[in-house]
Image (cartoon, rainbow, N blue to C red):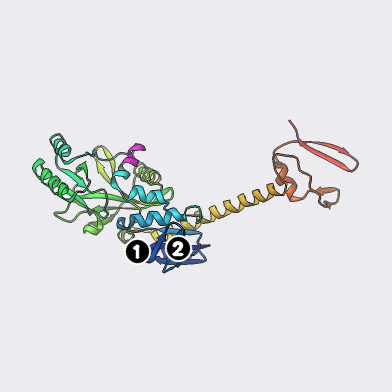
Amino acid sequence: MKGAVISLGSTSSQMVADSMKKYFDEVDMIQLRSIEVRLGKESGIFYEGKHLANYDCIYVKGSFRFANLLRSISALLEGKTPYLPLPANSFTTVHNKLLTHLALEQQNIPMPRTYITSTIEEAKTLLKRVNYPIVMKFPEGTQGKGVMFADSQSSASSLLDALGALNQPFIIQEFIDTNGEDIRALVVGDKVIAAMKRVAVKGEKRANVHAGGEPKAILLGHETSKMAVKVAKALDADVCGVDILESPRGPLVIEANISPGLQGLQSVSTINIADEIAKYFARRTEEILQGTQKKKAAEVMQEIGLDKSASQKVISQLTFRGDRIILPVIANKIAQFHDDKEFSLTLRKGKIEIEEAN
């Protein structure tokens, strides 16, 4: 199997690529900045001026600033690369907080109360009704960037004026006081493989490790783990960092990240996180390749007339073991007999008919 990681070359990406080398025959690290997507007559993905090679598994990841390129790469790879841990639609959804919240809302996943308005004037009207403090977010951004806090209507109104000058869309969200703590759960496939509690530095509300937050080991409860997996499924991501607040109303999801950093989580984890990710990639790739081979074999059988829905005549020599007759393997592939059934045999010289008994 051949695998590749397309990324900006972060430490986390390199960790995963190195671990993949244990499970794939060949693994390439591909720099996202050196990729060009061409549409139209010369449609395709080009790396350093040449057509991107074919791979069985490609892990595409990168900053929200490259969201359009990431979506384009994944969209062109779909249908050609057997396994993509992050399909194109996951980049569309997760790199926009508004679309993320809408996707989670559709799956009834608990979140802080979130508000979206059409104009600055409507937002200022809303500010008269909400409880403070509040959080104001740009739809795009990771690692806590683009997140602002307002502890009063006047400070929120001032932030709105600034946002209006920037002509930027924004989201208003209730602030959940957790003493500067949140939880990052890393979902791979259908389970949480590692989790940590992040504690913000003094004077900072954001607990992100990139904002100076201190990671601490934590064991997630069953319900919280189940919620994190549900988030990843809603976002169609096989690798997803899910950020959760422990509130009086129970766990609330505040954000998701499909390009999660691994260093902070690895520093408090007892497992090799990159290795777990690589093993999952290899297992899924192998399952898909085997499924494709079976499908092709079935298509070949149908093409040569071995349609399971109709009677087939197969000419073959029989194998004898004393008085026993060993049927050729293809006979049972077509008949699909099982040893828990009883059979009716009609016998005469030179002919045997076998049927499942009613």
Left or right: residue 51 compared with residue 61: right
Residue at 30% across / 57% down in the picture?
65
In which image quadrant can residue 215 be found?
bottom left
- Secondary structure of residue under mark 2: strand
Residue 4 is marked as 2
Q: Is residue 219 visible?
A: no
**The disc labelled 2 sits on which kind of residue?**
Ala
| Depth check, front residue: 210 or 169 | 169
Q: Is residue 146 visible?
A: yes
Q: Give the magenta range.
A: 102-106
Q: Which residue is mark 1?
A: 8
Residue at 32% across / 62% down in the picture?
263
Task: Tell me if residue 2 comes above or below residue 178 in the rendering.
Answer: below
The alpha-carbon separation of the residues under discs 1 and 2 comes to 13 Å
Q: Position of residue 333 (x, y in %)?
A: 70, 46
Residue at 43% across / 57% down in the picture?
39
Residue at 42% across / 58% down in the picture?
59
